[in-house]
Amino acid sequence: EAAVTQSPRNKVTVTGGNVTLSCRQTNSHNYMYWYRQDTGHGLRLIHYSYGAGNLQIGDVPDGYKATRTTQEDFFLLLELASPSQTSLYFCASSEAKNTLYFGAGTRLSVL
Amino acid sequence: GDSVTQTEGQVALSEEDFLTIHCNYSASGYPALFWYVQYPGEGPQFLFRASRDKEKGSSRGFEATYDKGTTSFHLRKASVQESDSAVYYCALGNTNKVVFGTGTRLQVLP
């Protein structure tokens, strides 16, 4: 069954720490997205990509890097984590202008 | 830039009540419009979409009509059930960037 798998599901790090969130999709979709979800803000787009090696800037990119290594794999990197990045992160995949399929999320706590 | 506004942060209804959740958008061009639903502990899941003016999308008794004139895509359901309790997100897709509203938490009391 086609799916979007995120790992880890939970992560705790300290301020200034280095964190990588992973996302793999088996939907054969070209587009992949990283969102963060916070109370009062809903889902906010961090970065997205339309293929291996491509990266597009979202609406809240500060403090985040991303890399799309293959069609299946999209990584979100926090190189100097801050408490303001404590959030629930979702990865999603889609075809152009079509339905997004979301993973189950990664809950990140930055102490 | 593109944006989606959901005016209701929370809605509390009784079973069999009529539901309306308001969604207005601002975008260049002609975006696709979506509704997503999120249950506790899960990622958002697609409910339905509409791609052109006056098109109605629907699923599971929920429906919304794309209105370019009022830039709206309001979610409605004639008779809600307790199992409809969830967070509902309106979203727009434009040039492959998908932007979400802030979400509306629906609580349906038995």
Image (cartoon, grey):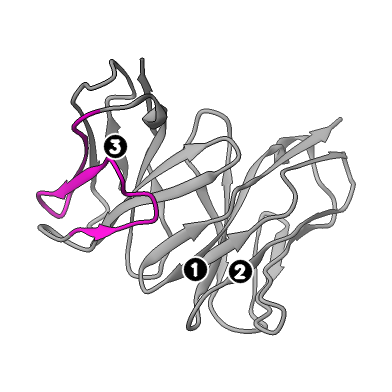
Establish if B53 lies above or below A96: below
Pointer 1 residue: B2
Q: Is residue B26 left or right of residue A64?
A: right
Q: Chain of mark 2?
A: B
State the separation of the CA atoms marked 3 and 1. Answer: 28 Å
Give amino acid for label 1.
Asp
Mark 1 vs 2: CB contact within 8 A = yes
What secondary structure is found at the residue carrying circle 2? strand
Q: Where does residue B103 sit, x and y in percent of width and height?
A: 62, 47
Q: Which mark is residue A5?
A: 3
Choose mark 3 or mark 1, whichever is in front.
1
What kind of element bears circle 3? Answer: strand
Mark 1 or 2 closer to N-term?
1
- Badge 2 crowding class, 10 Å Cα cut-off, few under 14, some 14 to 19, many 20 or more, is many
- Chain to which mark 3 belongs: A
- Which quadrant of the view contains residue A75? top left
In what quadrant of the picture does the C terminus of chain B appear? top right
- Name the spot of residue B55 as percent of width and height, x first: 64, 80
Mark yes or no: residue A39 visible.
yes
Q: Which mark is residue B25?
A: 2
Residue A27 or residue B94, whichever sits in front: B94
**Mark 1 neighbour class, 10 Å CA radius: few under 14, some 14 to 19, many 20 or more:** some
Residue kind at label 2, given as amino acid type: Tyr
Q: Residue at x 32, y 27 (%)?
A: A82
Residue A16 percent coordinates (x, y): 23, 22
